[in-house]
Image (spheres, coloured by chain):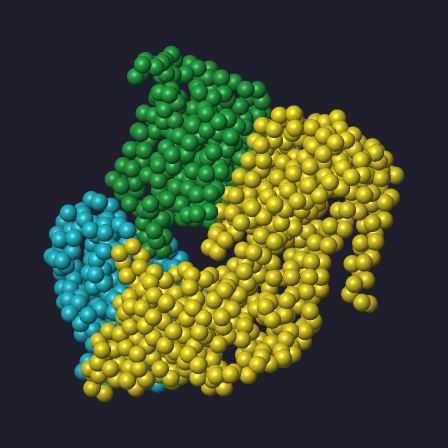
Chain colours: A yellow, B cyan, C green
Amino acid sequence: MPPLIVPALLVALAAAVILVAPLLLDTYLVNILVRACFVAIAAITVDIMWGYCGTLTFGQSAFFGIGAYALAIMFTEYGFGTWQIFAAIGAAVAVAAAVAAFTGWLSFYPGSTPLYASVISLVVPIVLVQILYSGGTFTGSSSGLVGFESFDLEIETWLRLAGLGLLATAVLALVVMRSDTGRLLSALRDNDSRCTYLGIDTSRLRIVVLVLSAIVSALAGFFYAGFGAVAAPENASFAFGTNLVIMVALGGRGTVIGPVIGALCIEVASAYLANSLPYVWELIVGLALIIVILVFPDGLLGAVMRLVKRGRSAVATTILQPAIAATAVSNPDAVAIEVRALGKHYGSLAVLDGVQFTAYRGELLSLVGPNGAGKTTLIRCLSDGRERSTGNVAIAGHDIARLPPDRVVRFGLGRKFQTASVFETLTVAECLRVARTHADPPALTSRSATLALPPAAMSVVERSGLGERLDEEARNLSHGLKQALELAMVLSLEPDVLLLDEPTAGLTRAERQGFADILTTLARRDRLCILLVEHDLDFVREISSRIIVLHQGRLALDGSVDEVVNSELVREIYTGQHVSHAEVPA
Amino acid sequence: MSTMLEVKELASGYGSSEVISNVGFALAKAETLAIVGKNGMGKTSLLKAILGFLPAWRGSVRLAGKDVTRVAPHLKRKMGLVYVPQEHALFQDLSVRDNLRLGLLSDKDIDARFEQVGGWFPVLTKRLGQRAGTLSGGEQKMLIVARALMAKPGVLLLDEVTEGLQPSVVDRLSEVLVRVRREIGTSMIVVEQHLPFALSISDRYLVFKRGEIVDAANVDTDAAARIDEHMRI
Amino acid sequence: MLTVALDAVTTAAMLFIIAAGLLIVFGVMKIINFAHAAFLTVGAYAALVGAHLNLPWFLVLPLAFVAGALCGGVTEIVIVRRLYKRPLDAILATWGLGIVLGQLITLMFGREVQFVQAPISGTVHLFGADYSAYRLVMIVAAVILGLLFTGLLNGTRLGLSTKAVIMNEMLAQGLGVDSSRVRLITFALGSGLAALSGALITPLSSVDPNMGVPWLIGAFMLVMVSGGSLLALAGSCAVLGTLQVLVSTFVNPILGGLTIAICAAIVLRIRPEGFARA
């Protein structure tokens, strides 16, 4: 049976239920359900922002309110009519998009924190509600706008439309979130900095998602107000924004269906219980929120799904294939890294001072020095234009200026972090596909069955044994395999320059040897320039073509392996094994 | 002689990878034990497992006769086990005095302790009010060791104290550690790459390789050569 | 003019008193306690009960503090302790607790707005203007609080341990500092302060089950801007509090209510780490 039949049947069933339900339910419940459907659509947008992209947002209510007021103001000022409907929809979409774009610009920039984005999302509805309060008769102030003429539809028709709208939104959200694009968003949530170092402009991506989800939320608000012929400040309030978050948290973040169930249940239950048990009902919601956060962090549906999933194992479906080879290296010995008078200061403390060197393609350059010598800081200054205090850095002939990492990466730089930095909840294939975002833009509605990798990444995948585990989640890999996966991800960028920070730490002897072979091949055959920070001097001696010694933030020595290993200076500052060699007669 | 620290069949690691296996040794009162081996062989992990920062997967740790395998790190410190970490070992933004105060559990005997420790590290007594982050590398290292000695530790674990230090500072440290042992009878474990320093202050040594002990013996004139053999392979 | 200046100073003082508890929790635990508003309300109701029982004011304040500290201690043990690694979830869980406490208070005391008499009534004649005496008390209270905290942090063993935990928790543990105890004490202290501030401001505002929420947002923004430093918090309260009073007086009170939130959002965009080291 083709895999799409079951979901298609479920959707058809849901549609049938929505069409029949109005005939069976009493008017009061139908009335509540219409509103609940629109609220559920807003909850889906919260789920996308929070459950998938990792930004806890209290601000989706603001966009809902913008939609509601766009309709209310238009119909109050100009009456009800065809052009007014379209003008109101246009206004709702435009204002919501503009506010979302501004909010996004405030919330997401290189280095912003999730907490800060949450803070901004709190401010937006508060500001909006105050503006509504001070809008006089135009916004109806604290009592909102009522008494305007609105759509004249049977309540049963409303429920059918609202239900189908909710169903369509949910299906669309599910399809997109399960597509390659959706996995990219989850990668953003799992590890924003890894995305940045894969050349992805994460801030822009987050802003785009926010704008789209704001538009959807505004449309939900638009019809909510159209149905009730009321727009009230509560529709835009911070309290409603937190209620949406509670619905998503209880239902199950990152599942789309969970938040829909959460929204419908809470809306219906509170409509019934708020009258009979006014305070107790909210008390129960508060308690439920605490318990769910503590015990079932992924919500009730998430907990159920985890139980169901437990028995199933991943079915291998992804097929590897070679990517069309990039153009051959034009100048195999070109300058790859050029560093001039590089300095990094924290206040008066100089971590790096006057560092200067040039590295060429095909070189395997090791960076050694005692702890605190500034090795990792140097790597950071090479890959992020905003890090250094003074001096210049050029990667493959491009001055990195003050550019953020995602731009530097596009000059041909790849950086592997010290601790394996992968996307924990994505499968191996998905991690690699995210790394190929620039070469193969991800599909918006489907998941690719094949994975095209450049030769270098392919050889790492095959040699490490990742090839057999493509459809396994990255968090289940061993430490060594995670390191290999991250290397393969970085190599998927087809970089000219590869920066590695202690890649062999914690690896077994066999894994280390494998790593050495891979690195040597990359330098010799693929003409990569590799800069390696490494503690293990034996490993360094074995694979390097040149060694740079860093000591107390200065470049102490730059020479061939023999020159460095036999240097007096190095013995003095790097009290490793060599000192004992020199001073203790064997 | 009484046993201060006894480690038996200890195993531990990160996530699913076991980085130390089946480690066992005993440390007598006022004895110094060197643990040598190349980087990345699990020496620091061993210290962390003894302290309890890494959970023990198997085996036991006994401190002065008491089983402390599952005791939290801060409680072990109260029982006299003091650790000198290799990295991030100072509160850079606190003064030298406050760093030293943190070496004691209360401010009760602070003046007497300042006096003794100040005698070992006179350079620090002139800089008590200075921010620790503004000291030179060697002075910072002395401060870290001095802070550990504030407590008159029963057992002192030193992780690569000589790394990146000038020879004169290394000499100063070994002098002080020898005096400490004589004056307050501290037992020590010295994890080191700097063999001459480690052997000059130790009674016995263990060679650590891939999380296991591959050699253990008394320090004698041939020790350096034997260890060198292990390091090469 | 003079009244505006005094309004600015007293507003800054009130903001400082309310935000201080939130700040120490954020400083030590990197967690925003959204139940702060509810603890503030608990303190306000403690003051209300005290007033009904005719307890003297100097007894009501410690009573409110203890009530808040007890709530905070239990909260830390039952909820917050499990969420240190999930700071965003901690916001939600403490918000849930805020809902629960708010509803419990409603069930016990009803929903209506109530008032507490100021212990010091009337006005003081100051620089040629008459000004509410109790508002001036706020300044004194803020100064005492600031000094107490500076003293606690810089002059005591607990303060030293707390600083050590903030700077490097693992190192502090290795030195024998029980960091979970430090956190418990910090959270209880912060919650106690929230309640104390609630009791202090009741004579100036009305008491109702949701009175804390409007304060929470302002305090929250101030804490983010000050980045965990008490001195920076005092500065932010002074600057943003003054701005708020100026905008409310000369432009529009509703816009005045937004001053802190908007300014703080923009300041944080430009300087994400706040002003801890400025």
Q: Outermost residue toward the top?
A: C122
In the image, taking residue C50 as reference, residue C99 lies left or right, namely right
Q: Residue at x 72, y 30 (%)?
A: A77
Q: Residue at x 44, y 15 (%)?
A: C117
The image shows residue C151 at horizontal and vertical percentages of 27, 36
The image shows residue A586 at horizontal and vertical percentages of 23, 87
- Residue B85 image-quadrant placement: bottom left
- Residue A353 image-quadrant placement: bottom left
Q: Of residues A139 and B93, which is closer to you in this image?
A: A139
- Residue A154 image-quadrant placement: top right
In the image, taking residue B91 as reference, residue A77 lies left or right, namely right
Q: Of residues A170 and A229, which is closer to you in this image?
A: A229
In the image, taking residue A428 as reference, residue A4 lies left or right, namely right
Residue A531 visible to an observer of this rendering: yes
Q: Of residues B181 and A403, which is closer to you in this image?
A: A403
Q: Which part of the image, by quadrant, shows the C terminus of chain B?
A: bottom left
Above or below, comparing residue C22 to residue A396 in the picture: above
In the image, taking residue A445 as reference, residue B207 lies left or right, namely left
Q: Which part of the image, by quadrant, shows the N terminus of chain B?
A: bottom left
Above or below, comparing residue B232 to residue A297 in the picture: below
Above or below, comparing residue C71 to residue A356 in the picture: above
Q: Residue at x 46, y 61 (%)?
A: A404
The image shows residue A500 at horizontal and vertical percentages of 43, 73
The image shows residue A48 at horizontal and vertical percentages of 63, 51
Total numbered circles:
0
Q: Residue at x 58, y 57 (%)?
A: A205
Residue A245 visible to an observer of this rendering: no
